């Protein structure tokens, strides 16, 4: 009986949050492809959330099979003329179509139409993130901690740079700082970089120079991560905390800014991983996402929805990378086609898709390895 309860708790606490987050993000990504495909009068054979065997589904009046599949690690929209779930063209099938059939095939459309369909998925992810962030700011407001230094930790970059308790951070490398979170964003991915920081001290502005140090930290759940640290803490005085209420317009504007911030920070982090300035072991796969979803769900489903927004931005960005099989890979092929006036040869496209498959499998294996190692004792 205990094992049944343990399984139930695990299912409710881990599986359901994971499925909620990933399914939401995947559904809206594929919905972007679907809607723009319909707008361009492309026949759509299937809309799937997940891969593998179908669990449940139905066929609509336009002949599209909507289905939920057994492996919840993605999804796809299958257009007429596609060979598989990655929208690779089935040239043999296309050659057998008559003119009426071919008119509804994805490959028969103009290059700009196919490009719009490809980019629609990532754009839908960004729109989803903006909507979630905007809703959160509208209903909950935003909480701001003023960028005032309370304590300077001994032996840190901040102490060496000459920070003092009571300093108000004005700017970092010329970028205005209005909250302590702005400062954290500017510092966390700048380990090893010399930062020019303007502070206000007793009404006088002073310029300090500091180089954040890469430091291992733990979040409230005990997960380890490496981040750039100056070595200062914010004032805990109640007067230093402010809640700002937002209307629809200001909430949306702030949501766009937040989405842009998540995107730029993600790209900067990935760039630092590539050049070896960030630890690649911080990359997470499906197991890691499930773990984070479970942990965040304990804080409330409003936090889980916010996690879905962050993940939506990440998936949107990943899909724009110029790797065959991803949307960015299709866009790369279409750009080449637009320049040369004809598609790449069938052989070149097949080689490209094989390369893309190897890249994606390699990334999935590496990220899953990180997840497993992270769960092991020690």
Image: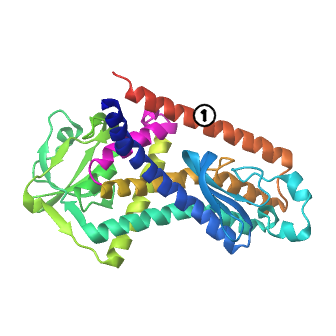
- Residue 344: give x, y in percent of width and height: 82, 52
Look at the image and say whether residue 268 sits in the magenta stretch. Answer: no
Residue 107 in view in this figure: yes
Residue located 52% across and 38% down the image: 274
Q: Is mark 1 on a helix, strand or loop?
A: helix
Q: Quadrant of residue 167?
A: bottom left
Look at the image and say whether residue 283 sits in the magenta stretch. Answer: yes
Q: In this view, does 59 lie to the left or right of 186?
A: right
Q: Is residue 166 left or right of residue 14?
A: left
Residue located 73% across and 73% down the image: 41
Q: Quadrant of residue 262?
A: bottom left
Q: What stretch is highlighted in magenta?
A: 273-300
- Residue 352: give x, y in percent of width and height: 75, 44
- Residue 64: give x, y in percent of width and height: 69, 64
> Main SS type for the magenta part?
helix
Q: In this view, does 137 lie above or below 230?
A: below
Between 288 and 265, the one nearer to me in the picture: 288
Residue located 32% across and 65% down the image: 136
Q: Quadrant of residue 29?
A: bottom right
Between 129 and 14, the one nearer to me in the picture: 14
Q: In this view, does 37 lie to the left or right of 200?
A: right
Indicate the quadrant containing the C terminus: top left, top right, bottom left or bottom right: top left
Indicate the quadrant containing the N terminus: top left, top right, bottom left or bottom right: top left
Residue located 28% across and 47% down the image: 298
Q: Residue furthest top?
A: 378
Circle 1 is placed at which residue position?
A: 362
Residue 190 in view in this figure: no
């Amino acid at each position: 009986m205990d094992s049944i309860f343990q399984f139930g708790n695990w299912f409710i606490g881990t599986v359901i949050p994971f499925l909620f987050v990933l399914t939401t993000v995947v559904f809206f990504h594929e919905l972007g492809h679907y809607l723009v495909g319909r707008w361009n009068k492309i026949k759509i054979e299937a809309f799937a959330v997940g891969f593998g065997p179908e669990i449940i589904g139905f066929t609509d009046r336009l002949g599209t099979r909507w289905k939920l599949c057994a492996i919840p690690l993605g999804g796809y929209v299958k257009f007429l003329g596609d060979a598989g779930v990655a929208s690779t063209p089935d040239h043999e099938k296309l050659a057998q179509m008559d003119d009426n059939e071919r008119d509804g095939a994805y490959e028969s459309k103009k290059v700009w139409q196919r490009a719009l369909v490809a980019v629609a998925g990532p754009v839908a992810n960004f729109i989803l993130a903006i909507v979630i962030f905007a809703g959160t700011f509208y209903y909950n407001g935003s909480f701001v901690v003023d960028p005032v230094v309370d304590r300077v930790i001994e032996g840190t970059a901040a102490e060496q740079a000459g920070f003092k308790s009571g300093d108000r951070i004005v700017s970092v490398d010329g970028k205005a700082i209005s909250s302590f979170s702005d400062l954290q964003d500017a510092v966390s991915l700048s380990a090893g970089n010399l930062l020019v920081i303007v502070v206000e001290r007793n009404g006088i502005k002073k310029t300090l120079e500091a180089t954040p140090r890469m430091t291992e930290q733990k979040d409230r759940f005990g997960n380890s991560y490496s981040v750039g640290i100056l070595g200062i803490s914010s004032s805990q005085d109640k007067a230093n905390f402010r809640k700002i209420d937002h209307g629809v317009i200001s909430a949306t504007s702030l949501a766009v800014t937040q989405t842009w911030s998540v995107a730029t920070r993600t790209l900067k982090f990935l760039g630092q991983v590539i050049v070896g300035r960030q630890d690649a072991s911080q990359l997470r796969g499906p197991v890691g996402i499930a773990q984070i979803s479970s942990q965040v769900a304990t804080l409330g489903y409003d936090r889980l929805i916010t996690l879905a927004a962050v993940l939506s931005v990440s998936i949107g960005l990943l899909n724009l990378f110029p790797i065959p099989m991803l949307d960015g890979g299709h866009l790369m092929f279409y750009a080449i086609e637009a320049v040369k006036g004809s598609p790449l040869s069938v052989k070149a496209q097949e080689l490209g898709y094989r390369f893309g498959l190897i890249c994606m499998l390699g990334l999935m294996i590496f990220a899953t390895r990180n997840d497993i190692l992270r769960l092991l004792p020690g």
